Image (cartoon, rainbow, N blue to C red):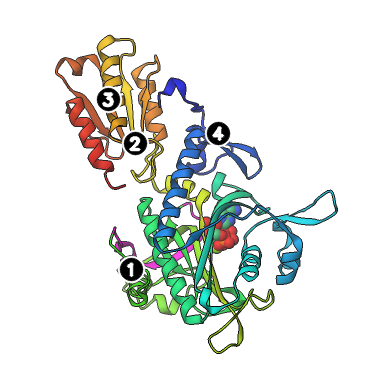
Amino acid sequence: MRLTNYFLPVLRETPAEAQIASHRLMLRAGMIRQASAGIYSWLPLGFKVLRRLEQIVHEEQQRAGHIPLLMPTLQSADLWRESGRYDDYGEEMLRITDRQGREMLYGPTNEELITDIFRSAVGSYRDLPVTLYHIQWKFRDEMRPRFGVMRGREFLMKDGYNFDLTKEDALHAYNRHMVTYIRTYERMGLKAIPMRADSGPIGGDYTHEFLVLAPTGESEVFYDRAVTDLTLGNREIDFADREAVREICDTWTAPYARTDETHDAAVFEVVPEERRVVGRGIEVGQIFYFGTEYSEPMKAVVVNEAGERVPVHMGSHGIGVSRLVGALIEANHDDRGIIWPEGVTPFHVGIVNLKQGDGEADAACEALYSGLKARGLDPLYDDRDERAGGKFATMDLIGLPWRITVGPRGLKNGVVELTSRRTGESEEMSPEAAIDRCAQIYAGL
Ligand code: ATP
Ligand code: MG
């Protein structure tokens, strides 16, 4: 993309309403624009990141055999009456009446709708297990929408639902989700720690929240530092192998890591003092096994091998896709702007032409631009007729991980400069070498 052809409305001023870095930077970098309280338009740069996160979520869900579909945002109130949640949900639910007087709602989550889809189609244990998911907008009329997309009213969530014959099968689905989530966040360049969370009235150990450590997080967290050293990496995982999947979960859940809701000071004390950390975190996902809580009232039953009709065991699993954009920035920025991890950056490389209009500089930039594209990369070429300082400031603000700077002086020696946004280190090399290096950096991402 050439910047003169793009739509990147960056702000010079720091918006007064933004209290945290990610909100400020998303507004300044022209990623979002508030439409009304807690509701945002995603401008081209922000939309690109959002789409990239969706793509990673899809790939990791499908790697584990989970099946994508798409349910609507508007749902019928009747389904929610069946589960008993229509009245329980309270003020957070946006309720709507259509012209026929039918009661509708803008879905805050989808357990009822997916259960209805399931029960209309599945009647036998032979059709199990199945895990369905979608990535769709949700609406929760939050009391205090704040921090930009971190706590919006309309927000994008991946929500997945597993249907299994037995509790044991459903717990395998739970573990599978834990592993896919760990992989998903890692690919985004984030450290998100599964923490034992509050399962509410259902009880049991079967819910974990995933938290990104950040001082601006809304949750207080208590953890053993050892958990932050774990990485899953890009290893092959056989998601059908229950033992293998459980082992990964055991490794990740062995160190103490809890939110304030489940924190137990006595158990925490057992962790060696130098490893005990009390901090803050941003909840970017949650997984849940809830057994037959919805399948019983909503009569989602299958006939088992013995010919009996039994309610299915279910779980639900959510990732806050739009909140993740904010969480990524909270975890990756400095006072000049955003620093995107390579896995999620909106453009792979920025090209800065120091002397727009200079025949040689322009030609070298064009060659870099087409050369990078020929290697499957997506460059952003700042071809504006602007001072170098302004161009650098824009690149630093929008946070592309790599920048190639092209100017007449370097070209005399046959070199351009490749700069890392994260370390600030620059290296001179030929334009061909710069293209090669960028292709290497992004290979396999
Ligand atoms: P919170 O405790 O932050 O209100 P929640 O526990 O109610 O979130 P879940 O029902 O677990 O949310 O939803 C799954 C994920 O959706 C959360 O982990 C979070 O990342 C995201 N999410 C929830 N509410 C919001 C919101 N208002 N704005 C943006 N993302 C949200
Ligand atoms: Mg939650």
Location of residue 368 by image quarter: top left
Ranked by sequence position, the earlier of labels 4 and 1 is 4
One can see residue 39 in this view: yes
| Mark 3 touches mark 2? (CB < 8 Å) | no
Q: Residues within 10 Å of mark 3 (few under 14, many from 20)?
A: many
**In this orientation, which residue lies closer to the viewer: 121 or 282?**
121
Which residue has dot 4 on it? 15
Q: Is mark 1 within 8 Å of ligand 1?
A: no
Dot 2: within a 10 Å radius of its alpha carbon, few (fewer than 14), some, or many (20 or more) residues?
Answer: many
Mark 4 crowd level (few <14, some 14–19, many ≥20, 10 Å Cα): few
Query: In the rendered image, is residue 218 in sight?
Result: no
Q: Residue 96 appears at what percent x and percent y? A: 77, 52
Give the mark, 3 or 4, whose residue is nearer the N terminus. 4
Question: Which residue has dot 3 on it?
Answer: 368
Q: How many callouts does the rendering have?
A: 4
| Quadrant in which the N terminus is drawn | top left
Q: What is the C-alpha distance between the residues marked 4 and 1? A: 48 Å
